[in-house]
Image: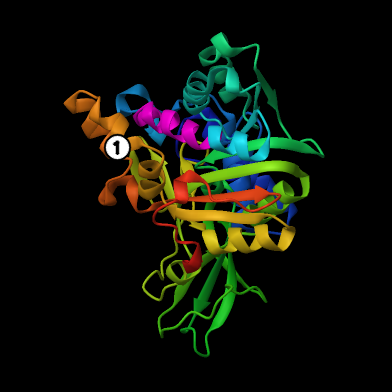
Amino acid sequence: MRAVTKTPDSLTTALTAHIADAIATAGGWIGFDQFMALALYTPGLGYYANDSAKFGLLPGSGSDFVTAPELTPLFGQTLAVQVDEAFEHTGTSEVWEFGAGSGALALQLLDALGERVQRYTIVDLSGSLRARQQTLLAAHAHKVQWVDALPERFEGVVVGNEVLDAMPVKLLACHGGQHGGVWHERGVALHDGAFTWADQATDLRPPVEVEGPQDYLTEIHPQGEGFIRMLADRLQRGAAFLLDYGFGESEYYHPQRHMGTVMCHQGHLSDSDPLVEVGRKDITAHVNFTAMALAAQEAGLQVLGYTTQAHFLINCGLAQRMVELPPLERATAAKLIMEHEMGELFKVIALGAGEAWEPLGFSQGDRSHRL
């Protein structure tokens, strides 16, 4: 059975039909993690695999959202200070960036690090984004390479800005309150040719008991945890710095966060319905950083630090760089660290292969003890 979409957009029509076929093949229901993976990554059709603009400052550009590197080059220039220190501590000289987006962060890091980076490897599944990155990074073409998967063994400094939030999550819903309630996995089915939510009983549970009498919707992150375990298995020497929006476990599964964190971005607006306009908008979920830290430790990586983006960037010298900017650019850069913008919601976690050390970005305000 093929879903009938109301939009004339051929991309959405084709992707909707593709997902509908997957639902039919699976017997009428797929988990939300599979739906999210298909909506974002189906070759040629998924949001991150098609030719839409995605990244940009203004809706008029056709973009859907802005990330820190597009906001100001100071983001990458400041992160480069931490990467350079990591090179010294780990004895490496290669950067591995996951999900490089427009290529803005790669350009900023390459420009700032200069000869200190010998090779820059981008791990990206999107062919359309790869073409955009190649154009932007043409001046560094002799150092940059693209791969669609990690090698079995590698070393260097891993960076990932807003990568974990785009990894598919499983949705869990408790009906009847947590005390005596019944947990279900929330998935996607078809009804009258449209995608609809459908719940199935499950043995899956959040990692902690959620208090409170209300119904509760939340996420678990097996794919994100699997990504961390893969890093642990393959990173022989080096460190990883992952920046994203999210919380530690106690905040993530707080009783007041009973609607979950899945959200969509389109035209610089946010909404909470991933079942419509598939392929034309981003789908994300906040990161449970405790789950990522535990996965890292259990797989043999060191947790080198965890803090807010504001603390991290200030520790790496952002404030001094901002002083030199004209007022308008300074105000834009301030969004990286302002509490009501990106400073508090965005976190940074650092993982290391080898002996533990304290990266500069966590010298003040480390929150590892809260994980």
**Residue depicted at 46% across the width and 74% down the height:** 216
Residue 285 at x, y percent in the picture: 49, 53
Is any part of residue 191 visible from this angle?
no
Disc 1 crowd rating (10 Å Cα; few below 14, some 14-19, many 20+) is some
Residue 194 at x, y percent in the picture: 52, 51
**Residue depicted at 52% across the width and 46% down the height:** 359
Residue 130 at x, y percent in the picture: 60, 22
Magenta stretch prevailing secondary structure: helix
Between 74 and 105, the one nearer to me in the picture = 74
Classify residue 40 as left or right of residue 237. Answer: left
Farthest residue toward the top? 139
Q: Quadrant of residue 159?
A: top right
Indicate the secondary structure of the residue bearing disc 1: helix
Q: Is residue 276 magenta?
A: no
Q: Which residue is mark 1?
A: 319
Give, as a three-letter code, the residue at label 1. Ala
Find the magenta span and give its range. Answer: 69-83
Classify residue 355 as left or right of residue 312. Answer: right
**Residue depicted at 39% across the width and 28% down the height:** 70
Is any part of residue 289 visible from this angle?
yes
Against 35, residue 155 (above or below) is above
Farthest residue toward the left? 327
Farthest residue toward the right? 152
